[in-house]
Amino acid sequence: MDALTALNETPLAQFNLDRTRHAAPQIFEHLRELIISMSLTPGSVLSRTDLAAQYNISQTPVRDALIRLSEEGLVDVYPQHATVVSRIDVNLAQEAHFLRLSVEMEIARTLAASADASLIERLRKFVSRQKAALEEKDLSGFTLADQAFHRQMYEAAKVPHLYALVRRHSGHLDRLRSLHLPAPGKAAAVLADHDAIVDAISRGDTALAEQSVRKHLSGTLANVEEIRSRHKDYLKN
């Protein structure tokens, strides 16, 4: 599938460029989300000409967006030839997992050490949104609520900039998660994990909070071979 077809067919195609802001960051975020969600699968060709036409802008901001995607390893650029969505690098996914696990276990410990009722309420609301999205079989909405849940933890621990750092390094891991999420029972397991994390924090149990985060974040990589068996052309190693 080429980028133009994907942009036209995906629900994320409902994209309106904000003309009061720089175009390149907006294009980057939109393309990145298409890649992370696997709406643009590995091997998809990204033509600057087609993308510029789709977004109704010049090629310069498209080029800048593709450069940023390349820096995150989400696209491979072949000069004078093509830019294509990269295959998922399992080694980079493992590194991202190590980083995220280290950060979020410490965040969970910090939050449990000073349990805050208003935080617990906010986290439970995000879990409720996930449950509602799952009932509607809305995996996109489920994922957005999942991201909001984790981001809230970073903000509550007063390390919001670390969320951006971890996100920037997690593209390959997040694509594996997108492939894993539709597996039977996976979304329900995510909900159960989130409930367990919130319960541990609310009880002020720092050890259990850390343990719950470890269990939650380790599910996808523990199933990487099963994911590979279903999507072998999407994985690099």
Image (cartoon, rainbow, N blue to C red):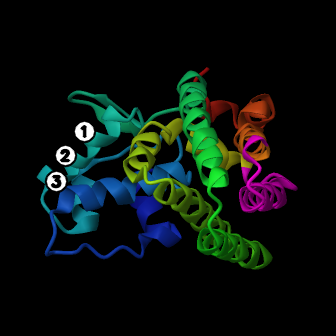
Q: Nearer the viewer, residue 212 or 135?
A: 212
Q: What residue sits right under mark 3 in the picture?
A: 61
- Hey, what amino acid is under mark 2? Asp
| Segment colored magenta | 181-207
> Which residue does the image show at 57% across and 30% down from the upper left?
93
- Residue 220 falls left or right of residue 5: right
Label tally: 3
Q: Are marks 1 and 2 in contact (CB under 8 Å)?
A: yes
Residue 139 appears at what percent x and percent y? 67, 66
Q: Quadrant of residue 216?
A: top right
Q: Secondary structure at mark 2?
A: helix
10 Å crowding of disc 3: few (<14), some (14-19), many (20+): some
Say which residue appears at 51% left-offset and 67% top-offset: 10
Task: Check disc 1 and report its element: helix, strand or loop.
Answer: helix
Question: In the picture provided, is 31 more to the left or to the right than 235?
Answer: left
Whether residues under marks 2 and 3 lie with C-beta atoms below 8 angstroms apart, the answer is yes
Q: Nearer the viewer, residue 105 or 95?
A: 105
In the picture of the structure, the residue carrying the numbered disc 1 is 67
Give the residue at mark 2. Answer: 64
The residue at the far right in this view is 185
